[in-house]
Structures are given as C-alpha cells and as structure tokens.
Image (spheres, helix red, strand yellow):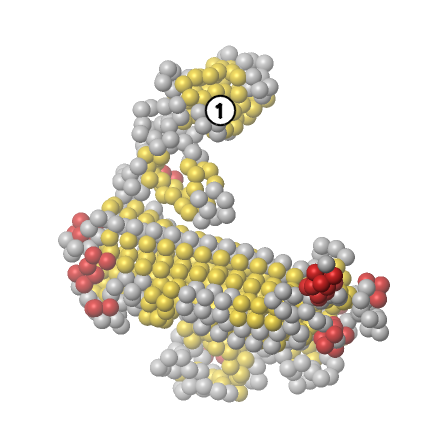
C-alpha cells in the first residue's frame, strides 16, 4: 500500500508544486517574489529576468485589464504533459501589452506643425500612428490621387513634369507601383523640378521602364499639410505632426517597440487571454520553437505582422482576433504541422492606400507542410485573404471577403507552384474590390497537385477561379457565381499540350449580369486538346445563353455556345440553364443561398413561389443547407405553392395554403394553424382540401399565428394588425 501511495505522489508531484507568478502594473513590486496577487511583480522587465525560475507546469499571470509596457521575451520551455502558461488573473478581460511613447508636444517654427523630441537612443523608425484610434497616414504628396512617371532614364532616375509643383523630398521616400500587385519604397537621393533620383535601383522582372507607373512622395517634413499627417526624423529623434490645435489634447498612439512578445527556442508554451497592441513591427514573433498554443488572443495595430513565425512546428492559433495589421495577420515560414482555427482577421493592409508596400494578406504560409487552416473569418484585405505554398495543407471552411482593396492580381485564396496533397475545401470567397484582375481562388504559376472541392466564390472583379499555367489539379463541386467578367478563367500559355490535365467537373457557374457565364479559356492550343477532362459542369445564366470564349494566343477571340463546345468532345455531359427568362426579367428571379455558419441553416426562398435548382429539380418550401454550402435557385414564373394572403374581407383576413400538384421533394401533406392562445384554428390535409384557409375574427387586433406542417416544423410566423381604418394588414 505504501508503495502505491509513493508511486501516486511521484506521479502527481509536478502538478502539486506548479507555481503561479503574478504581475500587476498597478500594485506590483519587482522586489516581491511574485507568488501571490499581493506579492505580484510589476514589470515585464522583471518577468524577462526571471525566466530561469519558470518551470514546466508553471503559469505567469498578468492582472486583467491592466497595461504592461515592453517586450515580453519568453525563453523557457514546458513539457508535453506540463505546459508553461502565460495568461491573466482577476477577471475576464485580457491584460494589454504595449509600448506608448510619450513626451511634450511644442509648437514648431512652421505654422500648424508640432514637434516631440524623443529620448535617446533614438528609434530607427516609427512606422505608424493612431489618433483617437483612427489610423493616420504619414506625410505624402499628393494627398489624393498619385503622380505618374513620364519616362525612365535608368534604374535610378525617373522624369515627371508634375514634380514642378511637388515639395523637395530629397532624403525622403518614393513609393512606386511597379506592378498592379507590387509596390516598392526607395529612398530619394535627389529631386528637381522634373526628375528624381533614387539611392538604389528599382527592378521588377526583366525590365526597368516605369513609364506610366503611379508613385507618391512621402516621409518628408515638407509633405505635412493636412490634419494628422506626421513625419519622423530618425537622425534628430524628432516626431512632427500637422495639427490645427495642440496634439496633446488628442489620444495619440505610436511606438518604437518592434515586437511585443518574442518566443525563441521554446517548447510547450501556451499564451491565452492576452491583448497585444501598437507594435511598431510585429506583435508576436516565434523562432525555432514547437508546440506553441495561442488561444483567445487579441492583436491590433501592428505595423507589419500580428504573428510572425519561422523554422517552427506544431504551432496552434485558435479563437483569436486580429485587426488593423499592416502586412499580414499571421505569417508562418518553413513551419510545419501548424493549425490556424476559428480566428477573426479584419483590416489587413487596407487602412490607407499609400501605406501598402508588400502584398498584404490575412494569412501567409510560406513553404509550410501539413498545416490546417480552418473556420477562420478574414475580411478587409489590401490584397490576398489566404496565401500559401507547401505540401499536404488543408484549407477548409474559411470565409474570406473584401479582398484586393488596393492591389490586384490576387484573390481570396492564392497559391502557386508544384505541390502534393493540398486541399482547398468548402471555403467561401466573396467580393474582390479593386478594378482589374482578382479572383476568388487563384492557382497561379505552375500550380500542380491541388484539389479544389466544394468552395463558393462570388462577386470577384474578374473570375471566381483562375488557373494560370496550372496543371494536374482537381476542380470539382464548386459554385462560381456573379463575378463581373467571367466565372472561370483558364490561362495556359507556358505549358505543353500533354500537361493540360486539370480535371474540372460538376461545378456550377452562375451569371446574372449579362456577361459571359462560364469559361474564358485563354490557350495557344485547340479546344480539342482539353478532351474529356472538362465534364458534367453547369452553366447557369437564365438571362442570356451561355458563351464559352476562346482566346487563341495571337488570334481573334472565338465564342461558342455549349452545343458547339461539345462538338470538340468537351463538357459532353454538361448542361445549361434549365430556364431561360425573357428580356426584362428581374434579376431577383435568380437566387443564390449560402450557409456561412457551422450549423445547418434553413432558408425559405418564398412563401408562395416555386423554384428549380441548377439540375432542373423542383424546390418548394423550406431549404436546409449544410454548413459552408450553397444552392442556386431559379424562380419558375406563374407557379405558386406554400402560404399566401388570399384576400381581405370585411370579416377578417383569409390565409391560404396553396398546393398545386408539383413534384416537390418534401411536399406538405397536412398542417394546422395555431392561434396565439394555443387553440387550433383549423386542421387539414392537402389531400382533402385544395385551398384550406383560416379567417381571423374582427376582434383580433394583434394576432400572431403560425403554421405547423406534418413534420412538426414551424413553417411561418405571421403578425396581423389593424391599420388606422380598422382593416387587417398581413405581415410575415
């Protein structure tokens, strides 16, 4: 018995002796031992100096809703059974880690400008500023629009007659849009009334001619001429702001702190319920670490990245929020077996057009294998929602909206290159914003080995999906709808005939805008080269006969309808719209329902109308969609079923259930009307009553009633009220 007791004590002893270290910026003291709330430490500096005391199973707890300044540098490790936790205590609100530069603003010699002298050592950069929680752009010229390069002399010298009206920004910076998807910021060595010379080459691709490219001058004191514009001089350590009144009256947030938290060479660490804000570069940086869990985190106002990780493994980010991030909310490089699940990411690289330098994305996975990116919501992207490269990655059930706000040639989900085992499944990508090319899903240069299954992509500026020199991919069971120009774009200019081996089957392509509804296939090859790899797709455009457009490289575009297309032995089993509407039909006749939640949802397209789906099957009554799925419905003219208000009579309101003999998949066979008191007004079956009805009595002034169907489901709610004239008005 004593041996068993000894064994048990040895087994649980690590947990019995695990310690909590407490940190409070309001009532802590770094001379304390930190082992209780009343003996809490005070600063992050003390925590950093005490890493050797923090052992597996221990926790470091920051007091809830307090603010801590400095960089938390984590260098300790837990074990697989005893993680080290960094979290909060004394409340549900997170502790806030930030650095806020302070000082006294004084009037500058130039009117309406103010200066703040920072303490030494001067920070090399200040990358962002917020005033009253609103992002403020750095000083720039012009304030709106852009300048345009007239001509290129060489890789460092550019001409523009518009410079005659610009301030001299020598020593400042020029931001050049070298391509629609890339901008380069370079120091200005010198500037004249017609030219500027750079401190290094601007290079993009095989050429250097930047004629016609947009650019901006910025980061120079002489650009300050609008409320809130600012400029930092790293040589003098002076921060300037343009303001019509004392900026000390405003809530200014700016920082020289490059990182709020760093984790280096650590294992089995958990961070939870903490808030990081106002990073001059990156909120949380992880290097050469494994088994790091980040849960219920908040990262806001990071100038570059929310979380930046490299050469790590088994990282897990869950249930966290990211907002107002400059370049990327989450970026993993050469980090494998990682999970990014159920996070909210908003406003990445979209705060100001002239602040966009890189290719801002919600999530970057660079050369990462075996990642799971699932059930995240990503909204408001300067360019890309989710950018990934690597093998055996699962990208599933993410919602990505409002991408390519400032830069184009991107999309909701972007990838490129040869890979194996990558799956893009059940994602919803909607609303590509900027003019030009943007796509819901973008398989770029030589993408190979991807499965794209069950996704819904709508309302891109160009196409729902783009395969650019992409081969050996499987594109099945997707809905591509309502994109401005086309629903699917295939461009294959650099491949050989034998490698055009994408399998594209059972996809629904929907257009209701009168433009092409289906493929725009750009290829130097004959359509016959595509063979039977395209089949069983649905081209839905009930307002116009579908067109499949072929752009033979260097030749005139050709247009085909589906029947002619099939003559090339392509899309043999594919179908067009089961309905074609006459000219002038409302676009509301075509509906796309999407369930973007994690639970089944029931939709009710109309209380008395009949629809058919993309296959021509009749749909009436309730429609239940599984999570991350959708359905395309077309209203059948002049057919009704379901519930309607029959007419208004002096004795009350007549409600009717109409049931024409339609092949509905789930017909209602019997029903009952329910009075507010629970009394049954009328029972009936559709078999013995062609038009069952209920009449509300005159004394019903506010009558909520409902219809219950044979399967026990409440079908509809009505609220009946009298108008000023005493007449009943129906309302759903």
Q: Residue at x 60, y 77 (%)?
A: 265
Residue under circle 1? 707
Quadrant in which the N terminus appears:
bottom right
What is the x, y in percent for residue 494? 27, 72
| Picture residue at 61% right of the left edge, 60% below the top | 295
Whole-percent x, y for residue 111 in the image: 69, 74
State the residue lying farthest toward the top. 651
Q: Residue drawn at (39%, 53%), measured in percent from left and top?
A: 455
| Figure check: 445 above or below 397 | below
Q: Nearer the viewer, residue 617 or 516?
A: 617
The residue that appears at 21% across and 61% down in the rendered structure is 530
Residue 32 in the image: state x and y as whole percent: 84, 71
Question: Residue 173: where, in percent of width, then height?
Answer: 54, 80
Q: Is residue 182 above or below residue 530?
A: below
Q: Is residue 15 visible?
A: no
Q: Is residue 306 left or right of residue 586?
A: right
């Amino acid at each position: 018995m004593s041996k068993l007791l000894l064994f048990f004590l040895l087994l649980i002893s690590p947990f019995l002796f695990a310690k909590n270290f407490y940190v409070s910026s309001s009532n802590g003291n770094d001379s304390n031992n930190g082992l209780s709330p009343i003996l809490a430490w005070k600063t992050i500096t003390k925590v950093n100096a005490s890493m050797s005391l923090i052992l597996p199973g221990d926790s470091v707890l920051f007091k809830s809703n307090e603010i801590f300044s400095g960089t938390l540098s984590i260098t300790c490790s837990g074990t697989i059974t005893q993680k080290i936790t960094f979290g909060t205590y004394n409340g549900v609100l997170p502790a806030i880690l930030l650095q806020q530069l302070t000082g006294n603003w004084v009037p500058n010699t130039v009117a309406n400008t103010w200066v703040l002298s920072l303490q030494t050592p001067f920070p090399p950069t200040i990358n962002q500023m917020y005033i009253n929680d609103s992002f403020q752009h750095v000083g720039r010229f012009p304030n709106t629009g852009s300048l345009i390069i007239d001509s290129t002399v060489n890789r460092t010298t550019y001409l523009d007659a518009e410079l005659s009206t610009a301030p001299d920004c020598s020593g400042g910076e020029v931001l050049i849009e070298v391509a629609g998807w890339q901008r380069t910021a370079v120091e200005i060595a010198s500037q004249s009334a017609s030219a500027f010379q750079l401190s290094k080459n601007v290079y993009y691709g095989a050429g250097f001619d930047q004629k016609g490219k947009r650019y901006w001058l910025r980061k120079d004191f002489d650009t300050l001429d609008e409320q809130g514009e600012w400029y930092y001089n790293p040589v003098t350590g002076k921060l300037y702001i343009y303001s019509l009144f004392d900026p000390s009256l405003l809530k200014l947030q700016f920082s020289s702190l490059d990182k709020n938290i760093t984790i280096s060479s650590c294992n089995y660490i958990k961070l939870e319920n903490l808030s990081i804000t106002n990073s001059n570069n990156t909120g949380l940086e992880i290097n050469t670490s494994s088994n790091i869990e980040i849960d219920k985190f908040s990262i806001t106002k990071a100038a570059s990245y929310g979380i930046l990780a490299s050469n790590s493994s088994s990282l897990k980010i869950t249930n966290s929020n990211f907002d107002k991030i400059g370049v990327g909310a989450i970026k993993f490089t050469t980090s494998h077996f990682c999970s990014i699940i159920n996070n909210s990411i908003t406003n990445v690289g979209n705060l100001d057009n002239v602040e966009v330098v890189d290719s801002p994305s919600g999530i970057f996975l660079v050369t990462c294998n075996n990642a799971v990116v699932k059930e995240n919501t990503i909204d408001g992207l300067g360019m890309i929602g989710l950018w990934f490269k690597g093998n055996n990655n699962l990208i599933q059930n993410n919602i990505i909206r409002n991408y390519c706000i400032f830069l184009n040639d991107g999309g909701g989900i972007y990838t490129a290159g040869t890979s194996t085992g990558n799956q893009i499944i059940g994602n919803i990508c909607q609303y590509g914003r900027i003019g030009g090319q943007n796509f819901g899903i973008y398989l770029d240069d030589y993408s190979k080995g991807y499965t794209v299954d069950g996704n819904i992509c709508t309302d891109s500026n160009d196409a729902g999906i783009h395969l650019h020199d992409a081969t050996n991919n499987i594109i099945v069971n997707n809905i591509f709808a309502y994109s401005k120009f086309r629903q699917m774009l295939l461009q294959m200019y650099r491949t050989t005939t034998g490698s055009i081996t994408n399998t594209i089957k059972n996809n629904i392509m929907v257009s209701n805008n009168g433009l092409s509804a289906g493929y725009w296939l750009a290829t130097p090859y004959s359509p016959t080269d595509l063979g039977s790899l395209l089949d069983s797709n649905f081209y839905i455009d009930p307002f116009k006969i579908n067109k499949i457009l072929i752009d033979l490289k260097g030749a005139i575009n050709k247009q085909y309808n589906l029947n002619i297309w099939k003559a090339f032995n392509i899309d043999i089993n594919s179908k067009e719209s089961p309905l074609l509407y006459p000219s002038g039909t409302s676009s509301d006749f075509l509906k796309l329902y999407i369930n973007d939640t994690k639970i089944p949802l029931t939709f009710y397209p109309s209380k008395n109308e009949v629809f058919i789906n993309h296959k021509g099957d009749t749909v009436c009554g309730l429609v239940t969609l599984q999570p991350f799925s959708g359905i395309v419905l077309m209203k059948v003219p002049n057919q009704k079923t379901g519930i309607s208000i029959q007419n208004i009579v002096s004795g009350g309101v007549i409600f009717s259930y109409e049931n024409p003999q339609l092949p509905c998949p789930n017909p209602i066979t019997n029903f009952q009307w329910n009075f507010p008191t629970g009394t049954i007004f009328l029972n009936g079956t559709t078999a013995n009553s062609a038009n069952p009805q209920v009449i509300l009595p005159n004394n019903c002034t506010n009558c909520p009633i409902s219809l219950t169907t044979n399967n026990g489901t409440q079908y509809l709610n009505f609220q009946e009220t009298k108008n000023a004239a005493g007449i009943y008005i129906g309302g759903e």
